[in-house]
Image: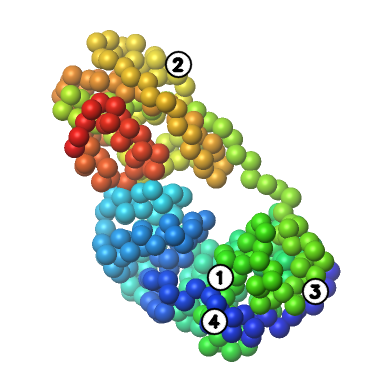
Amino acid sequence: MTYALPPLATCIVRWQAQHGRNHLPWQNTRDPYRVWLSEIMLQQTQVTTVLGYYERFLATLPDVASLAAAPADQVMALWSGLGYYSRARNLHRCAQVVMAEHGGQFPRCAQALAQLPGIGRSTAAAIAAFCFEERAAILDANVKRVLTRVLAFEGDLAQARQEKILWALAEQLLPTAASDMPRYTQALMDLGATVCVPRSPSCLLCPLQTHCQASKQGRAQEFPIKTRKTVRRSQSWWLLFLRTPHNQYWLQRRSAQSGANAIWAGLYSPLVYASADELDSVLVNMDGFARTDLPVLQHGLTHRELHLHPVVLHVTQAKQHPLPHNTDGAWWSLSDALAQGLPAPIRKLLADVAQAGGHAD
């Protein structure tokens, strides 16, 4: 199918200057480290959530050298609660590669940037466009929505061939002047985030309305077309919180092999069991310790709906270690535990466990 390519660049560059987001902390900088950090944090995460994390991260690790040299635990602790933790692991690894293989300088073109850990084609293009004014197309979820609506793109993006066609169209729509690339790239992001939203897009406020084929046809909600949907599978975990009378808590670092698809890999958690029977088979050998079951907590991930069953075991003292097998963990005070890299639901449950025990740390 042939698509007529409207002249988008000029009108959206002008729109972005007047109506776009121009005061975010990672804007108005050509520092690849800061732009890269923001782009990774913003993947599948709202701007309002990222703002605080971005500032705290930079306050502790202000440049690529400090990030590369930081312990993994420190990186994960700074990321704790932001979710999609593979981003933090790749971020750390990427900084180390930049230092070791690129002399501490980020490559200046999208093709080379895309070879770094955790940087895909769209993120590489965004860094290259913002920092080096390269004419490189981005195509994240928001931009796919904008372009498929403007073009009434009928291809199914579940098919790699159709996505490749959309990439080619995105490249053809780029502005001619390289100096327009930073604002053009930001304009597409802003349109997708604030105007051309998934449900109830604000078509009357959109600078592309006169060019938008989906709007003219009254079909905006039909795009983008993607037949293969993410299926979220339910999974139940039983979490064993060990707690002493001195308000110490046992946490262990989860390895890359822990759990289904390495969920929470590299983060700290209590002991995790796949079923109530598996947990009971452990507790049967731990007579003499009081048990408390707390309410189940549901936590949604991209591909999983976790049902977390917290069980508190009140042990006598830390040195009387009740664990039935060797584990890579340690006892922590509540304040020290909360300073570690914890998944958001574990952070909440740990606070609940402490409160249930009458702890004030």
Q: Earlier in the sequence, mark 2 or mark 4?
A: 4
- Is 352 placed left or right of 138 in the picture? left
- Which residue, given by chain and number where applicable, does mark 3 sit on? 3
Q: Secondary structure at mark 2?
A: helix
Disc 3 crowd rating (10 Å Cα; few below 14, some 14-19, many 20+) is few
Three-letter code, disc 1: Asp
Based on the displayed image, in which of its 4 quarters is residue 259 positioned? top left
Q: Earlier in the sequence, mark 3 or mark 2?
A: 3
The one nearer the camera, 29 or 92, is 29
Percent across and percent down for residue 64 are 32, 68
What is the CA distance from the residue labelled 1 to the residue labelled 2? Answer: 50 Å
- Is 101 placed left or right of 112 in the picture? left
Is residue 117 visible in the rendered image? The answer is: no
Disc 2 crowd rating (10 Å Cα; few below 14, some 14-19, many 20+) is few
Three-letter code, disc 4: Gln
Image height of 87 relative to 358, above or below: below
Is residue 149 visible in the rendered image? The answer is: yes
What is the CA distance from the residue labelled 3 to the residue labelled 1? Answer: 24 Å
- Which residue, given by chain and number where applicable, does mark 2 sit on? 277
Q: Earlier in the sequence, mark 1 or mark 2?
A: 1
What is the CA distance from the residue labelled 2 to the residue labelled 4? Answer: 61 Å
Based on the displayed image, in which of its 4 quarters is residue 167 positioned? bottom right
Q: Secondary structure at mark 1?
A: helix
Quarter placement of the C terminus: top left
- Which residue, given by chain and number where applicable, does mark 4 sit on? 18
What is the CA distance from the residue labelled 1 to the residue labelled 4? Answer: 12 Å
Three-letter code, disc 2: Asp
Q: Earlier in the sequence, mark 3 or mark 4?
A: 3
Circles 3, 2 touching at the beta carbon (< 8 Å)? no
Percent across and percent down for residue 333 are 19, 36
